[in-house]
């Protein structure tokens, strides 16, 4: 058992054999020099190197330190273990009471024999007798001869006699060592591919997890902004409601006061009439003509012979309901107009290219909508700090608020970039191209492959161009700049930048190698 444990400690985890020229990584794990060098070779070009045992990461290819403990001495620990294994005593299988050293081993019986038991052992040719050994795995099951060869066609280990048999005639036969090396070589290639594939999967997983976080953050931002907008609407509607209710209450109070004054006048007039009626009733009850004629009738003199009471109809103004609702609707329209600029997405219109910024290898169409790469120098006059040295052209329009989008038709041939840039972008040198600086953000198409670029950092996109229209969407306040591909039946999202914009953004186009791009309004 102790021997087995020691063997495990001296076994390389890559080739599963005893160490050959053992070396140690920084993490403390040991490997055959040839094995670990092959693994590290497959990791070249990746972001980091890793230990096959514990997956410890190394930014640079680790220096392989020779394991002096395993290698020291002559023979060293590994060689000494092999030597001990080879010279370990083998005991007779049949001497069960007292161990007796075996003198021979029969491969047919798979038993070891001392001199005594060997004398009574079968002398038949079928029984192959060799020097004492504990291992029967490296012998042919048919002829009991050492397995020294390998049939690639049948994936089978063979002895020399089996190699010459009819069963394996014409097959590809090689030595075990050669087959072992070839298979190990292929296995290492496969291992490298699997490691690379695993790393790509991990990168995709990380990218998708980052996208999930981005979507969560974006959703939270949208929820917050929607809450702010709804809160603004509520505040303005509450203020409008209070104003309208106050106006209604004011009109009601004014109309009620006016009507109350008329009622008071009518009540006073009614009291006067009631007093006169009482006097008339008293006069009508008189029977003495003298007293009646001498009575005071001055209050009724004007009314004698007049059949028309001459009462005028009093007209009172009603509440101005139509005016109230007209003002209400007008204020609500103003509220929605104020919110529209900050909430609704508008299509950019009137976008034209600025001829004063166009490089002399870019032809601009008469309607200032299309930029095309040109072999012929356009020989435009130099305008200080305005004209690009190569390939680029800005638009005359800038955006510093709200949400807008614009569509651009692009060519199938050549290479192009479209995006947004600050007016302060460099005009000369390699840092003037879209995405080669911190002042521009762009979508690039080259050799049928999309990528996005900003501040000299380029990220290839997994999807390939499937149509020739792209959309640029800008939410300036939220710091979002998105690129989409516009198909006939659907729109495909390509990438979204998150940034804090500090200057107005101008649409920008760059074209090379017969490419062109046209702004669609």
Image: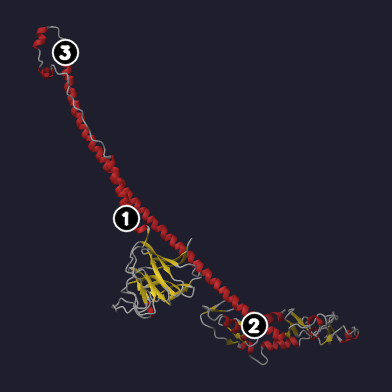
Above or below for 451 versus 83: above
For disc 3, the marked residue is 282
Front one among 178 and 379: 379
Front one among 72 and 393: 393
Mark 2, mark 3: which one is toward the viewer?
A: 2
User: What residue is rendered at 24% in x and 38% in y?
Assistant: 253
Residue 158 placement (x, y as % from top left): 77, 83
Tell me the element at label 3. Answer: helix
Front one among 494 and 141: 494
User: Is residue 85 in view?
Assistant: yes
The C terminus appears in which quarter of the rendering? Answer: bottom left
Residue 420 placement (x, y as % from top left): 37, 70
Residue 61 placement (x, y as % from top left): 53, 83
User: What residue is rendered at 29% in x and 45% in y?
Assistant: 326
Q: Is residue 51 left or right of residue 312?
A: right
* Res. 264 image quadrant: top left
């Amino acid at each position: 058992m102790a021997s087995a444990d020691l063997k495990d400690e001296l076994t390389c985890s890559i080739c599963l054999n005893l160490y050959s020229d053992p070396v140690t990584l920084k993490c403390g794990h040991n490997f055959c020099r040839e094995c670990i060098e092959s693994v590290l070779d497959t990791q070249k070009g990746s972001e980091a190197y890793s230990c096959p045992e514990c997956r410890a990461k190394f930014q640079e290819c680790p220096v392989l330190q020779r394991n002096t403990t395993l290698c020291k001495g002559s023979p060293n620990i590994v060689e000494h273990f092999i030597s001990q294994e080879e010279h370990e005593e083998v005991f007779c299988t049949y001497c069960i009471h007292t161990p007796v050293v075996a003198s021979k081993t029969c491969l047919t019986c798979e038993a070891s024999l001392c001199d005594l038991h060997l004398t009574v052992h079968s002398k038949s040719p079928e029984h192959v007798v060799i020097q004492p050994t504990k291992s029967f795995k490296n012998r042919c099951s048919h002829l009991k001869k050492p397995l020294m060869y390998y049939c690639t066609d049948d994936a089978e280990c063979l002895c020399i006699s089996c190699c010459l048999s009819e069963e394996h005639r014409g097959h590809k036969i090689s030595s075990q060592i050669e087959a072992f090396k070839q298979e190990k070589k292929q296995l290492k290639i496969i291992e490298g591919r699997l490691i690379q594939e695993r790393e790509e999967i991990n990168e995709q997983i990380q990218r998708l997890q980052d996208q999930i976080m981005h979507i969560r953050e974006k959703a939270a931002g949208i929820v917050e902004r929607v809450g702010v907008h709804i809160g603004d609407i509520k505040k303005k509607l509450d203020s409008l409601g209070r104003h309208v209710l106050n106006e209604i209450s004011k009109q009601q109070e004014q109309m009620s006061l006016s009507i109350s004054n008329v009622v008071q006048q009518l009540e006073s007039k009614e009291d006067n009439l009631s007093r006169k009626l009482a006097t008339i009733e008293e006069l009508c009850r008189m029977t003495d003509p003298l007293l009646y004629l001498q009575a005071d009738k001055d209050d009724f003199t004007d009314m004698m012979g007049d059949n028309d009471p001459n009462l005028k109809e009093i007209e009172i103004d009603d509440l101005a309901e139509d005016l109230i609702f007209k003002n209400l609707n007008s204020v609500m329209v103003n509220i929605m107009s104020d919110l529209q600029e900050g909430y609704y997405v508008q299509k950019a219109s009137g976008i034209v290219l600025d001829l004063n910024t166009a490089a002399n290898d870019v032809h601009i169409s008469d309607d200032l909508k299309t930029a095309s790469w040109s072999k012929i120098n356009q020989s435009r006059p130099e305008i200080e700090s305005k004209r690009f040295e190569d390939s680029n052209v800005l638009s005359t329009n800038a955006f510093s608020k709200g949400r807008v989008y614009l569509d651009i038709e692009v060519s199938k041939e050549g290479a192009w970039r479209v995006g947004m840039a600050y007016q302060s972008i460099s005009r000369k040198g390699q840092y003037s191209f879209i995405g080669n600086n911190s002042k521009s953000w762009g979508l690039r198409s080259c050799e049928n492959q999309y990528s996005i670029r900003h501040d000299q950092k380029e990220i290839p996109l997994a999807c390939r161009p499937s149509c020739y229209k792209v959309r640029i969407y800008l939410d300036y306040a939220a710091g979002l700049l998105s690129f989409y591909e516009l198909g006939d039946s659907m729109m495909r999202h390509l990438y979204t930048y998150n940034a804090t914009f500090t200057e107005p953004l101008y649409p920008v186009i760059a074209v090379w190698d017969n490419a062109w791009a046209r702004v669609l309004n």
